[in-house]
Amino acid sequence: MSRTTIGSELGRLTALQLVEEIGPAASRGGRRSTVIDLAGRVRFVGVAIGATSVSAAVTDGRLRVLAFERTECDVRQGPEPVLELAMEQSRRLLLKLGVDRPMGAGIGMPGPVDFSRGIPVSPPIMPGWDGYPVRDVFGRQFDCPVVLDNDVNVMALGEQHAGAAGTAENFLFVKVGTGIGCGIVARGELYRGMDGCAGDIGHIPVADSGEICACGNTGCLEASFGGDALARDALAAARSGRSPLLGELLARDGTLTAAQVGEAVAAGDATSVQLVRDGGRRMGEVLAGLVSFFNPSLIVLGGGLTLLGHVLLAEIRGAIYRRSLPLATRNLPIMMSDLGPQAGVIGAARLVSEEVYAFPR
């Protein structure tokens, strides 16, 4: 760009209080240059709505998390109570930091999203959310730009910004939780596909028959090894007596979740270990197909089921390495994300920061 264009753009960003002068640059002879930095008071809100929890964070302009809050919540309650919780969390965090209004807010949610309109589209595990104006409701509340995307997409952006994928041009971020999805980053850019549903690998068939999935089909990966599927199979093992330990946990807690399965795995329960290995193998087989198709330089696993730890990771790795060509896997790291629940909120803030700072076209 020409110096005139750069000056004009910096003037626009300064007027919007998005950048500021921080002093003169080091002298190189002649007139000293002025250093421009991101404005110190810039604040973004990142919200990650999951199937069983809602997280919110406030970040600075460099997307460093300044305040974070996570609350258990069932997304099936519907949009009004869930969004009210997310907005209340955000208001509380902003008040804590003395911020009147954020520069923008990003939101991730567990289902297909029409990115341009800011609405969910027929999300299988979110009854009552289809077509709900999430972006507009949030925007009216905070009087700022709002961007809505699929949860795994924003987690992939969070991993790219602050996690292990910072130097990876082509990578997959795989979320393994109540739902299963894949964020695809190609040549450094998030790939959404024609209608925004690229990476919805939870509904790839892994069996000719089986449990009915939330999407209405049978044999889907998500119905075989999502969080609900693992809890279902663990409950069957407890009630049949195949796992006395799971039976004890069921009697203690009144229910079984993936977290209890993880507890049983840590205690060495053979049945629980086998459940995780079977699911990890199916997961790895699907990912092996993606490796052969996309040839990524890195795969990062995130989401709630990563609490299952090394047993799950080892099985997924083994299936990928067995079923993919050696050329595609000889330099392919497969690892767990170390961002935990903050991956989604950082990615959501990253998403809206790109919108706010975008050069007008």
Image (spheres, helix red, strand yellow):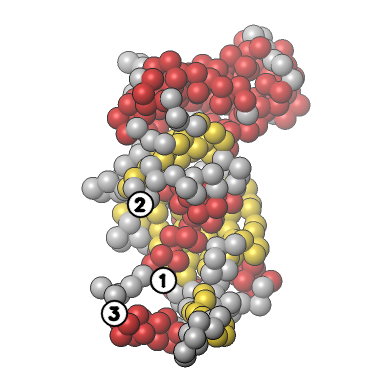
Helix, strand or loop at mark 3: loop
Label disc, if present, on residue 356 of the rendered structure: 1
x%, y% of residue 174? 46, 37
| Dot in front, 2 or 3 | 3
What residue does disc 3 label? 2
Query: Going by the image, does 208 lie left or right of 222?
Result: left
Task: Give the quarter of the figure containing the C terminus.
Answer: bottom left
Name the outermost residue toward the front.
29
Q: Is residue 258 above or below residue 323?
A: below
Mark 2: amino acid: Glu
Cα–Cα span, label 1 and label 3: 22 Å
Distance CA(mark 1)–CA(mark 2): 17 Å
Task: Count neighbours of disc 2 (C-alpha within 10 A) and say few if under 14, some if 14 to 19, many if 20 or more.
Answer: few
Most foreground residue, 325 or 231:
325
Gap between marks 2 and 3, in whole Å?
A: 26 Å
Q: In terms of depth relative to the viewer, which is nearer, 329 or 215?
A: 329
